[in-house]
């Protein structure tokens, strides 16, 4: 049963993220009172699964029936939707869930006395209810002030997530950087698959070989931190191997050596942060920078003739 002091929560948008948050908050005892989506079928589907939750066809009705309203629509619709909403009670708050979009898109609500904020779960929602379990242990990045910040922090904890505070104006850089832990990790795997394909390895076999190694690396990073989880020739100070691999990739053409060189530069940075960096780290750094100056020029020349 919900406690009377808890804020009533409303959702505009009933997609992958709203589905998980609405169920999660409701299970944690919060009153989820309203859902309004673009289509009535969508609002009905979500609201009918949640106790005492009403489906509306007009987003304004969700605003009127809740205290904190999550604007869970595609990023391109956040600003336009915010412009259509009216806030007569200053005790209300409008929150979006995008990692990249500025909270200032909600300024029309702030101008009417509502509090505004950002609540970005660092999680890729599938739309399945399995998300409810899988989101535990993730972080939610919160941008808000005062009472709204406290309320959003409590909501993140209710989902069994870690609240992470972000300064105003930092969202675009934050979101760009987060790609390295999601889609760019996949891009690194894709580069390996492409290079292994030249050896005749099928993609399925390659993934079966690579994914357990990636999982082990993630576990080690969790246990020991990034510098101590680093493995491979840079971590061991194997200058000869690094030089030969850079030369081999330069020989393949394209941007293979440039990508390898830039990531090796980051590997050198991690190795330098170890308590005892490898003795050959300066020689490796020099080999990487020399290769990079050749391969970046080559990649740029390749791009200009395309
Ligand atoms: N998906 C993720 O992994 C994830 C992770 C973190 C943050 N986010 C953020 O969460 C927000 C929602 O993303 P999502 O992945 O849940 O999107 P989604 O699955 O595509 O769902 C979007 C929902 O918004 C509704 N909608 C679209 N335009 C609308 C409008 N103008 N007015 C009212 N409702 C509208 C859609 O309605 P219908 O169902 O009726 O078509 C749908 O229910 C985005 O800001 C996104 O950046 C997503």
Image: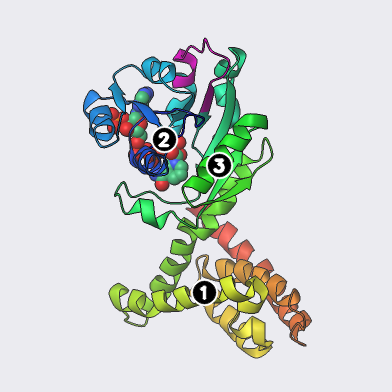
Seen at 57% across and 58% down, the residue is 301
Is residue 98 highlighted in magenta?
no
In the rendered structure, which disc, 3 or 2, sits on the residue that comes first in sequence? 2
Q: Identify the mark at residue 219; answer none if there is no mark.
A: 1
Work out whether residue 273 or residue 62 is closer to the camera in this orientation and state it. 62
Task: Check disc 2 and report the residue beneath it.
Answer: 2
Is residue 93 highlighted in magenta?
yes
Query: Where's the N terminus, which quadrant?
Result: top left
Q: In which quarter of the image is residue 270?
A: bottom right
Residue 99 in view: no
Q: Which percent across, then down, holds residue 41?
A: 21, 28
- Which range is magenta? 81-94
Mark 1 CB in 8 Å range of ligand 1? no
Q: How many labels does the image show?
A: 3
- The answer to whether 271 is drawn above or below residue 68 in the figure is below
Q: Which percent across, then down, holds residue 31?
A: 40, 32
**SS for callout 2:** loop
Task: Check disc 3 and report the residue beneath it.
Answer: 154
Looking at the image, residue 280 sits to the left or right of residue 253; the answer is right
């Amino acid at each position: 049963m919900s406690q009377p002091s808890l804020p009533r929560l409303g959702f505009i948008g009933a997609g992958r993220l709203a589905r998980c948050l609405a169920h999660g908050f409701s299970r944690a005892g919060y009153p989820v009172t309203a859902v309004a989506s673009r289509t009535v079928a969508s609002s009905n589907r979500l609201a009918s699964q949640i106790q005492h939750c009403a489906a509306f066809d007009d987003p304004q009705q969700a605003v009127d029936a809740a205290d904190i309203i999550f604007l869970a629509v595609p990023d391109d619709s956040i600003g336009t939707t915010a412009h259509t909403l009216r806030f007569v009670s200053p005790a209300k708050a409008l929150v979006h869930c995008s990692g990249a979009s500025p909270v200032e898109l909600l300024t029309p609500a702030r101008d009417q006395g509502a509090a505004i904020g950002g609540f970005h779960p660092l999680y890729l929602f599938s739309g399945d209810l399995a998300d409810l379990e899988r989101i535990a242990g993730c972080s939610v990045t919160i941008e808000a002030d005062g009472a709204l910040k406290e309320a959003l922090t409590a909501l993140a904890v209710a989902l069994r997530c870690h609240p992470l505070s972000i300064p105003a104006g930092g969202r675009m850089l934050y979101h760009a950087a987060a790609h390295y832990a999601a889609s760019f990790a996949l891009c690194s795997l894709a580069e390996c698959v492409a290079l292994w394909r030249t050896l005749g390895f099928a993609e399925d076999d390659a993934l079966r070989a690579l994914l357990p190694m990636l999982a082990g690396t993630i576990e080690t990073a969790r246990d020991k931190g990034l510098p101590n989880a680093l493995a491979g020739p840079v971590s061991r100070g194997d200058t000869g191997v690094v030089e030969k691999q850079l030369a081999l990739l330069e020989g393949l053409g394209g941007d293979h050596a440039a990508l390898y060189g830039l990531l090796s530069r980051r590997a050198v940075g991690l190795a330098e942060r170890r308590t005892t960096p490898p003795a050959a780290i300066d020689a490796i750094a020099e080999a990487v920078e020399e290769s990079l100056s050749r391969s970046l020029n080559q990649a740029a020349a390749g791009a200009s003739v395309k």
